[in-house]
C-alpha cells in the first residue's frame, strides 16, 4: 500500500500535541478529564497563513483524540492575535501566562516576536514552541574526544522528564540541526521534513 504523504505542518502540530499531552498525562492517575490550557499566538487571524496553521492544529487535536480516546488530558486552546507586532505578541503571551495560566504557548511566527515571547516563557517556565526561531537558551556542546553532543535548554529538560516518566526505557540521542560551524541547517519546516523522511525520529525545539 502506498503511504499517504502527510503535510509537514500537520506533522509538526501532531508531534507538539502528542508531546504536551503525554508529558502531562503521565503525572496523573485520575479518571476524570483534565483540561490543559495551551495558548496560540498567530499573526493576523484573518490571513490565509494563520487560518492554515490553526486548521492544522485543530486537525491534529482531532486525530490525536480519535486515536487515543482514553487520554485523560484535554488540550484547550486560547488563541491570540499578535497583529504582526512585537509589542502585541509579547502582550498576548503575557495575558495567556498570567490570566489564562497556560501550560504552553504555540507561536508566534516571526523571529523578532519569538525572541520576546521566548524570553517571557523562560522567565515563567512556560514552554514556548515557535514556528520560527530557535531560542538562544537551546544550545549544544560538542565533545570531540567522545564524538558526542551535550544539549541544554528548557525544552530538553521537558523532553527528558517525559522520557523518565515512561514505564519503559527508550534510548535516544540529541542531534543538533546545524552545520559544523554552528549555523542552522534550515527552518522548522525543513526539520519536520527530515522527521517525515525518517532521518530523525522526533524533534525538540524552543
Image (cartoon, rainbow, N blue to C red):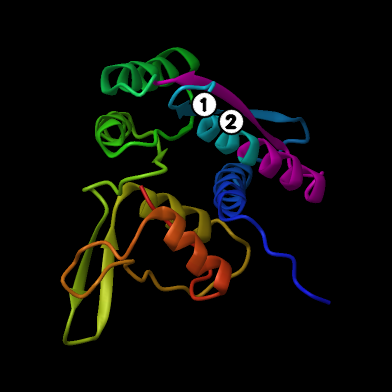
Q: Is residue 61 magenta?
A: yes
Residue designated by label 1: 47
Q: Quadrant of residue 69?
A: top right
Q: Which mark is residue 63?
A: none
Above or below residue 174? Residue 124 is: above
Can residue 17 be seen in this snapshot? yes
Q: How many angstroms separate mark 2 from mark 1 (CA)?
A: 6 Å
Residue at the image position 61 percent from the left and 43 percent from the top: 21
The span picked out in magenta is 57-82
Residue appearing at x 62%, y 55% in the figure: 7
Q: Which numbered marker is on residue 51?
A: 2
Q: Position of residue 9 (x, y in %)?
A: 56, 49
Classify 195 as above or below 65.
Answer: below
Above-or-below relation of 77 to 111: above
| Image point (16%, 87%), residue name | 145
Is residue 29 visible to us here? no
Q: Position of residue 3 (x, y in %)?
A: 75, 71
Label 2 SS: helix
User: In the depicted view, which residue is nearer to us: 135 or 143?
Assistant: 135
The local crowd at label 2, few if under 14, some if 14 to 19, many if 20 or more residues have their Cα within 10 Å, is some
Specify the quadrant that holds the N terminus.
bottom right
In the structure shown, which secondary structural element does the residue marked by tag 1 occupy?
loop
- Find out whether the residues at labels 2 and 1 contact each other: C-beta distance under 8 Å: yes
Amino acid at each position: 500500500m502506498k503511504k499517504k504523504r502527510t503535510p509537514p505542518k500537520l506533522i509538526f502540530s501532531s508531534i507538539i500535541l502528542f508531546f504536551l499531552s503525554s508529558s502531562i498525562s503521565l503525572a496523573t492517575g485520575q479518571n476524570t478529564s483534565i483540561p490543559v490550557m495551551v495558548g496560540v499566538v498567530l499573526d493576523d487571524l484573518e490571513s490565509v497563513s494563520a487560518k492554515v496553521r490553526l486548521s492544522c492544529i485543530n486537525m491534529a487535536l482531532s486525530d490525536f483524540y480519535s486515536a487515543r480516546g482514553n487520554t485523560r488530558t484535554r488540550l484547550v486552546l486560547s488563541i491570540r492575535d499578535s497583529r504582526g507586532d512585537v509589542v502585541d505578541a509579547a502582550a498576548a503571551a503575557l495575558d495567556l501566562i498570567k490570566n489564562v495560566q497556560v501550560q504552553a504557548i504555540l507561536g508566534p511566527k516571526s523571529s523578532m516576536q519569538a525572541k520576546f515571547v521566548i524570553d517571557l516563557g523562560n522567565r515563567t517556565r512556560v514552554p514556548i514552541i515557535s514556528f520560527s526561531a530557535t531560542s538562544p537558551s537551546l544550545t549544544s556542546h560538542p565533545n570531540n574526544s567522545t564524538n558526542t553532543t551535550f544539549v541544554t535548554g528548557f525544552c530538553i529538560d521537558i523532553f527528558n522528564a517525559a522520557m523518565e516518566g515512561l514505564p519503559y526505557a527508550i534510548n535516544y540521542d540529541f542531534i543538533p540541526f546545524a552545520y559544523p560551524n554552528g549555523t542552522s541547517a534550515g527552518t522548522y519546516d525543513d526539520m519536520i521534513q527530515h522527521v517525515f523522511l525518517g532521518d530523525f525520529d522526533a524533534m525538540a525545539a524552543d
